[in-house]
Image (cartoon, helix red, strand yellow):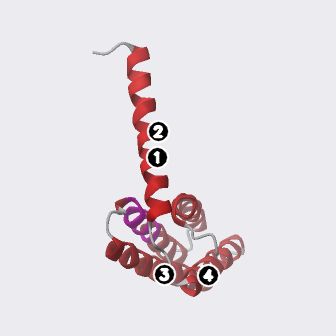
Amino acid sequence: MLPAAMRMKTWTGLCIFLLTATVFAATTLDLSDFDEDAMHAIDDAKQDLESDLSGNDAKSAAANAAIVRDGLKWAESYFAKKGSVDDAIQLAQQGQEFAATIIKSAGAKDFAAASDAYDGLVRTCKRCHDAYKPPSL
């Protein structure tokens, strides 16, 4: 087994490599055909979803979560066609899972679980935006 200092250096190096690879992919990826309106619709629905959940509005929460889920299906397909952006595809899939959980939880009026899933959705969106959001959005 490697000494702790060596393991830390190896782990740090791996993290730096992955971060650099993600930044490089985002800066070299052509996003000129990206549908900004689709992303704005997702973002608007995500923001409305926060209000829906804090107001315990199950019907609106489920509807807005479905808009987010469907938009992230589009994003998954978009990035799949670009190739070499598996992390963007995984983030879109994770976002869809969070949205599906929100739909299910809101339908059951379990707003605590829906809010937890919303928090996960927000973190997932941020991770993807940090790496791939076009400057114009």
How far across and down, in percent of the image, does residue 77 sit? 36, 78
Would you name the residue on which mark 4 appears? 40
- Residue 61 seen from this side: no
Q: Earlier in the sequence, mark 4 or mark 1?
A: 1
Residue name at image x 42 percent, y 50 percent: 21
Would you name the residue on which mark 2 appears? 16
Query: Magenta residues?
Result: 87-96
Residue name at image x 64 percent, y 75 percent: 136
Q: Earlier in the sequence, mark 3 or mark 1?
A: 1
Give the distance between the C-alpha atoms of the residues marked 4 and 1, in whole angstroms: 27 Å
| Disc on res. 12 | none
Drawn side of residue 26 relative to residue 111, left or right:
left
Q: Amino acid at mark 2?
A: Ile
Q: Amino acid at mark 4?
A: His
How far across and down, in percent of the image, does residue 95 sit? 47, 67
Would you name the residue on which mark 3 appears? 71
Q: Quadrant of the C terminus?
A: bottom right
- Depicted 9 relative to depicted 22: above or below: above
- Depicted 88 relative to depicted 52: above or below: above
Numbered disc in front, either 3 or 1: 1
Tell me if residue 95 is in the magenta stretch. yes
Give the farthest residue toward the left.
Answer: 1
Q: Is the stretch drawn in magenta largely helix, strand or loop? A: helix
Q: Secondary structure at mark 4?
A: helix
Would you name the residue on which mark 1 appears? 20
Q: Are marks 1 and 2 in contact (CB under 8 Å)?
A: yes
